[in-house]
Amino acid sequence: MKTILVAGGAGYIGSHMVVHLIENGYNVIVADNLSTGHRAAVKDAPLYVGDIRDAAFLDRIFSENSIDGVINFAACSLVGESVKKPLKYYANNVMGSVSMLDAMRRHGVDKIVFSSTAATYGEPEKQPIEEGDRTEPTNPYGATKLAIEEMLKWSSEAYGIRYAALRYFNAAGAAPEHGIGEDHAPETHLIPIVLQAALGKRSHIGIFGQDYPTPDGTCIRDYIHVKDLARAHHLALEHLENGGESGVFNLGSGTGYSVKEIVDSARRITGRPIPAKIEPRRPGDPSTLIAANKKAEAVLGFKPQYDLDVILADAWAWHSGHPDGFGDRA
Ligand code: UDP
């Protein structure tokens, strides 16, 4: 049985990864500092609580377990916060990955699947966005992820560590059958906020701008189910296990929905009215982000299975069943 270290495994995407790997016969070890993750999101795997920047912490994990590969979700991931606190993002994201790669090198672990982001592209030159398109991040969050991608490339050449860097578009949905879903504080993402408005926990959803150059004037994004994301990481891991080449892959559905379309679909799925108000644009939001997803399909064999209705239905099942998330906030 292979053993995988999932760093950030108590977080939103990481916790879905842990469940997926266990279901697929892997032994899973979780490392998380619980700064934004939830202990209750880690159901059936040992949890090491600590910071991946701490070399002694990683040495303990790699010595106590025979780790075959690493999936690293441990990072700060709020675009707006990154603009206000760039050093926090460089310190946490870049230094965390330096520390993880160095521990892998010391302990002879040679495979890593890394959480990257569509924010590495910045303002796209065309749609859908391909992996070889220009990368000019417009915020520190995207810049730190791009810096780590570069570091992976050089580490791969120098130390023989092979990697898959997965550039997510908009992760959404939940796995209500496993009692896990999205729980951020503060919540900034569209779908959870829309569903909180459906639950009456917010008075309305504010739509950030309706003067974008899109058919209904609101921003278009490419939403991908978190369970599809987990499966894509598994396929990327298998690709590396089978000796496949390192690379960067978009993970998206290839289909875009506007903010208004999301709100309308959420009204239909929940049967709730969901009041909406037009508000000013949010600084730094590109008008449209849609993934070209053929490379992941061709190289990893990955094709998303779940459409927007399933994403919204699963997210709704989680939020309506857990209106206070994991219920672990003071
Ligand atoms: N959005 C919105 N109201 C909100 C939160 C988000 O109109 O309360 C919009 C946001 O401007 C963007 C889209 O919804 O166009 C998706 O935003 P989110 O923060 O979920 O993801 P991002 O694309 O920024 O990673």
Image: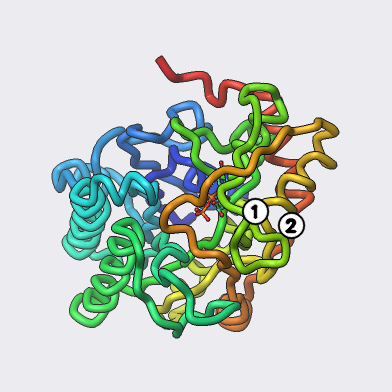
Q: Nearer the viewer, residue 249 or 113?
A: 249
In the picture, residue 295 is in which quadrant? bottom right
Residue on which the image places disc 1: 225
Residue 134, percent from left and from top: 40, 81
Residue 76, percent from left and from top: 34, 46
In the picture, residue 135 is in which quadrant? bottom left
Q: Nearer the viewer, residue 299 or 295?
A: 295
Q: Nearer the viewer, residue 63 or 182?
A: 182
Residue 252, percent from left and from top: 60, 66
Specify how the rendered protein is coloured. Answer: rainbow
Q: Nearer the viewer, residue 40 or 119?
A: 119
Instruction: Characterize the local packing of mark 1: few (<14), some (14-19) or many (20 or more) Cα atoms within 10 angstroms.
Output: many
Q: Look at 18% across and 50% down and name the residue there.
A: 87
Q: Look at 51% across and 51% down and name the residue there.
A: 281
Image position of 264 (left or right of 45): right
Screen quadrant of the C terminus: top left
Instruction: Characterize the local packing of mark 2: few (<14), some (14-19) or many (20 or more) Cα atoms within 10 angstroms.
Output: some
Q: Look at 51% across and 62% down and name the residue there.
A: 168
Say which amino acid is labelled 2.
Answer: Tyr
Asked if residue 120 is positioned above or below residue 54 in the image, the reply reads below
Say which amino acid is labelled 1.
Answer: His
Image position of 147 (left or right of 250): left
Q: CA distance from mark 1 to mark 2?
A: 6 Å
Residue on which the image places disc 2: 306
> Would residue 7 be seen by someone viewing this image from the given angle?
no
Residue 84, percent from left and from top: 27, 46
Q: Are marks 1 and 2 in contact (CB under 8 Å)?
A: yes
In the picture, residue 176 is in which quadrant? top right
